[in-house]
Image (cartoon, rainbow, N blue to C red):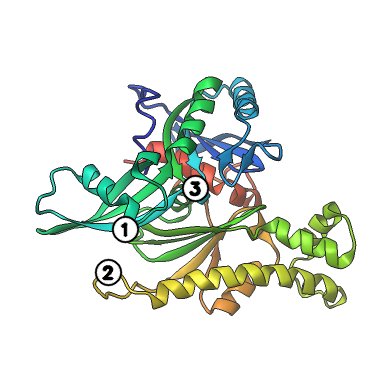
Amino acid sequence: MFRNLHKEFFPIPEFISSHSFGLDISEESIKFTELKITRHGIRLGRYGEREVPTGVIESGKIKNLKKMEEILTSLRKEEKIKSVRVSLPEEQVYLFKVKLEKEGLEDVREGIELSLEEHIPISAQEAVFDYEILNEDEKSLDIQVAVIPKDIIENYLSVFKNSGITVLFFELEAQALVRAVIKDGDLETYMIVDFGKMRTGISIISQGVLLLTSTTDIGGSTLSKILQDDLKISFEEAEKTKQKYGLGNDFDKKEIFSSVLKGVSLLRDEISKRFLFWHTNKEEGGKEHPPIKKIIICGGDSNLIGFSEYLSSSIKTKVEIANIWINISDTGKYIPEMSSEQSLSYATAVGLALGNFEK
């Protein structure tokens, strides 16, 4: 979605490049990944991360346009980046379904626009939206709509334009994650948990369509802060302690286990709420949602020792650590030069880059 938002600002090149860059933007960093088409298939090219200073981006909003332009300009010069696919902050995006009756409907976009204010807390004039038709019969259309405030998208467009980088597509983080971690053609129902440093994204996909997405402010830093307070140590020491012990079965470290569990339990509760909501609320027309087959976890803090096992036993469902190369290569023949632990932080960036090679 949001594939058409940039057209009035940036022309789409008339060629398809053999290189594709994905740019995952968050409050604390920009992660980039390059994928290349070779005679052996798609291969990983350059990748890396740039720090975003505190206060430049808050809750998905760019607060310091000049600083953001400086970061992007530096990235363009250092990595020779010309065009990118970019993630949009899910905190600022509204995702909902709407049914439009065909009778009297002359234009789908106009029909959606007339119904926007029934679903979102901003006016149609303040919003930019894209949509995807989910189902269609003789009488109606079932449509998935994604909306973002116009001022948010204009700021993102502005910083890229001023930094000299062409935006090919804007996309929700969760949409990029789906492309990276769900096997192409798999129509089962999954929950994807992106456990990051500052926040966690929770999404549900079914029949190849992203149907629910939300974020919580509980991230890896939440766990480190609890450890810092409980153990009376520095935040840096707390980070190292969290990574070393996690929820491991070290009986000599019961205090560490207890503190980490305290933070993980908060996240578990947020995941459980979405899991329960999905299974107890019905679709329009009274049809039950298909059951979630498994939870797929990614993000830098999904490497936490014991996290997947704890989540699985707590929610009583299968939990699996993501394979972000599932649609790129046969790892029996080609192993990208990135550790599996590190790759979990680059899932969104890889999914974005992979989008250029979709059929």
Dot label at residue 249? none
Measure how far apart labels 1 and 2 are at the Cα level: 10 Å
The residue sitting at the right extreme is 232
Dot label at residue 97? 1
> Does residue 124 appear in this view?
yes
Q: Amino acid at mark 1?
A: Lys
Measure how far apart labels 3 and 1 are at the Cα level: 17 Å
Which quadrant of the structure image shows residue 357?
top left
Q: Amino acid at mark 3?
A: Gln
Residue 210 horizontal/vertical position (percent)? 39, 56
Q: Is residue 101 left or right of residue 242?
A: left
Dot 1 surroundings within 10 Å: few (below 14), some, or many (20 or more)? some
Measure how far apart labels 3 and 2 are at the Cα level: 25 Å
User: Do the numbered discs 1 and 2 sit on residues whose CB atoms are within 8 Å?
Assistant: yes
Q: Secondary structure at mark 3?
A: helix
Marks 3 and 2, the one that precedes in the sequence: 3
Which image quadrant: the C terminus? top left
Q: Is residue 253 above or below residue 30?
A: below
- Residue denoted by label 2: 284
Query: Looking at the image, which residue is at 82% across and 58% down?
Result: 238
Q: Amino acid at mark 2?
A: Glu
Marks 3 and 1, the one that precedes in the sequence: 3
Residue 113 horizontal/vertical position (percent)? 28, 45
Q: Is residue 249 above or below residue 81?
A: below
> Total marks drawn?
3
> Does residue 329 appear in this view?
no
- Residue denoted by label 3: 92
Marks 1 and 2, the one that precedes in the sequence: 1
Residue 167 horizontal/vertical position (percent)? 45, 29
Q: Secondary structure at mark 2?
A: loop
